[in-house]
Image (cartoon, grey):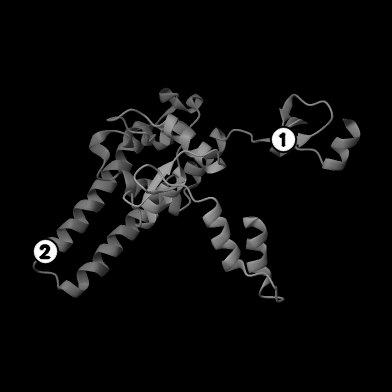
Amino acid sequence: MLDVMSGIEIDKAKKEFTVDNSAEYRRLKAKYERRDERGRSIKPNFFGIVARKKGYYDNKKKCYQFHKTTMDYVQHTLNKLRLSAGRSANKPFSYIIDPVLANSRNAWYPQVEKIIGAARDCAAEVAAVYSSIEIDQSLKYEIGQSIRKTFADYVAGVQCNSSTMYVLLKTLDKDDMSDIRSTILSLLFGNANSSFYAMIEESREPIGIAVECLTGELNLYGYSFTSHQLDNRPKLETLGETL
């Protein structure tokens, strides 16, 4: 019913309807209204998640309970995946890199140290500019940006093998690298460093696509599907003939 009413609201831009959506909505709201023992209006659990994000969460007038709805099932699954208190769910960026690339024997450590040293030098130079009393206040931002651009150009032009880039990312995972970690990662992404993107490409796993067929190894809602790699996915009409 709500789906139909939504379509009516959209189509009102093209034609008139005799249906009073407001009256119908009030009727549905009254029909399915439920309250708990404290008189609070019972709502699906995911309503509370949305309300918290938008700033109008009110547990005095509303009671958010689990319902057999798609979004509540999703939220229930997410809750089960949460880690225990005190542990972080965040993974370092190096987590996505293929471990095969972690062969440290092929890494050029002086280059890693040079990049990290350049990042610290850049941060120190910018800090010195802003703390200087000899430089005019109106020029500090411009000079700082010039120093950052020089470092950004350097990072963009860094060429190294995958093992060296992997070692750099693993080094950035360390606690004492928190002051420069985001800066270097942002520049590697933002300046499209070719070595960095080549390493990501080497770590990329093929994506499987489910294609419906009569005798597939996957069964979803009573339909059979077979899995094909995205890069080698056959045309649908050809696949239908072969299966």
* Residue 103 spot, x, y in % from top left: 45, 24
Image vertical order of residue 202 relative to residue 2, above or below: above
- Give residue 222's quadrant in the image: top right
Of residue 128 and residue 180, the one placed in the foreground of this image is 180
Q: Which mark is residue 200?
A: none
Distance between mark 1 and mark 2 Cα atoms: 61 Å
Earlier in the chain: of badge 1 and badge 2, it is: 2
* Residue 229 spot, x, y in % from top left: 70, 34
Query: If the image is split into quadrants, where does the N terminus sit?
Result: bottom right
Q: Nearer the viewer, mark 1 or mark 2?
A: 1
Query: Mark 1 packing: few (<14 Cα in 10 Å), some, or many (20+)?
Result: some
Q: Amino acid at mark 1?
A: Ala
Q: For the residue labelled by badge 1, is the local secondary structure a helix, a strand or a loop? A: strand
Residue for point 24% across, 66% down: 143
The residue under label 2 is 132
Of residue 76 and residue 163, the one placed in the foreground of this image is 76
Query: If the image is split into quadrants, where does the C terminus sit?
Result: top right
Total residue callouts: 2
Q: For the residue labelled by badge 2, is the local secondary structure a helix, a strand or a loop? A: loop
